[in-house]
Image (tube, rainbow, N blue to C red):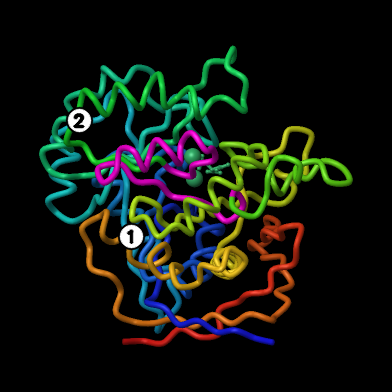
Amino acid sequence: MTTTITIRRPDDWHVHLRDGEMLKAVVPYTARHFGRAIIMPNLVPPVTTSASAAAYRDRIMAAVPRGVSFTPLMTAYLTDTTDADDIGAGHRDGVLTAVKLYPAHATTNSSHGVTDIKSVAPVLEAMQRAGMPLLVHGEVTSPDIDIFDREAVFIDRVLTPLLADFPALKVVMEHITTQEAAEFVAANAPRLGATITPQHLMLNRNALFVGGVRPHFYCLPVLKRERHQIALRKAATSGQSCYFLGTDTAPHLRHLKEAACGCAGVFSAPVALGCYAQVFAEENALDRFEAFASLNGPAFYGLPANEDRITLVSGHSNGSAMVPVSKDGELVTFEPIEPITWAVRNATSA
Ligand SMILES: NC(=O)N[C@@H](CC(=O)O)C(=O)O
Ligand SMILES: [Zn+2]
Ligand SMILES: [Zn+2]
């Protein structure tokens, strides 16, 4: 038996597209399903100014296949020396949608991240005045905090004071992974929102060790225990407007993941939308899928929902493919433990 569902075209509120050959290889997968995407700035070196964001946007647009409509929404990487005037001007000019806070060394390419939140107060004040959201990678980095506790400790030590010090600042807690985060976001909505990834909805930390170590399930924040997975599934499918789709598709070449010290990040762009639909179907919540995928994100960012539609269908086995990246190597597409049975049938223009 197959089920189909047609919804407004979704947006992806958390995407890594990288640069160069990798950018060219991955952009088509995001652009064919999603109308817009928030583009993460953690390149090497990072995108830290409006000028570098504008140049990066041009490189992304050059990689969008002809005939596909796709709008990258750019972000700047917050550092201890970010210029508040440049960020404000970038926002007024329509170049910058948001600013990204990585605590220094929290995740892939975050060595330039903020070491002390006080040093960026002028930038946060300017963003608060402009209504420009701050996107946070919500993990503390102190080595004495257990890796499975870093998100919950971030909420207590960093996010709670930040929300109090900047009471009108809009904040997105990216890729939430815990029950604590889901509850904290709902309690602080609507100025606080959260993205949730397919892997954190479909897997828990046991998946990292099924039959051996599984590097393609390794991402940050790392998968948590089952009670958190259950809480995230409940949150995403609740219909509450503070939760929205953000895949955190994060491509790394296969040989850099299948390594003695493998990179963090799951490449999910080709299959992500099917994964989300499957979760909503399993939770008997397909009637709330459009809110999570296509309505809540634009509402948080103050943007209109997309006018075109996309149709998904169940009953398809969706064999995940390897995506070649020039002669450099290849990407392994996310393949959860249970088969993905939902796929995009077609996207129609408005
Ligand atoms: N999520 C990840 O595990 N990795 C991301 C960085 C990030 O989103 O934290 C990446 O850039 O590879
Ligand atoms: Zn992150
Ligand atoms: Zn990310």
Q: Residue at x 48, y 59 (%)?
A: 237
Question: In front: mark 2 or mark 1?
Answer: 1
Please, is residue 86 above or below residue 24 in the view? Answer: above
Please tell me in which quadrant of the rendered image residue 306 appears: bottom left
Q: Position of residue 228 (x, y in %)?
A: 59, 40
Q: Residues within 10 Å of mark 2 (few under 14, many from 20)?
A: many
Instruction: Provide the residue designation for mark 2.
Output: 123
Relative side of 320 to 43, left or right: right
Give the residue displayed 63% in from the left and 49% down from the top: 252
Please report the bounds of the magenta region as a residue range.
Answer: 174-200
Front in this rendered view, residue 296 or 260? 296
Please tell me which residue lies in front, 18 or 344: 344
* Residue at the spot 34% in from the left edge and 17% down from the top edge: 116
Which labelled disc corresponds to residue 296?
1
The local crowd at label 1, few if under 14, some if 14 to 19, many if 20 or more residues have their Cα within 10 Å, is many
Q: Residue at x 37, y 40 (%)?
A: 185
Q: Please state which amino acid type lies under the numbered disc 1.
A: Asn
- Quick one: SS at disc 1? helix
Kind of residue at badge 2: Val
Which residue is at the far right?
211
Measuring from the top left, give residue 231's x and y in whole percent.
55, 45
Of pointers 2 and 1, the one earlier in the residue sequence: 2
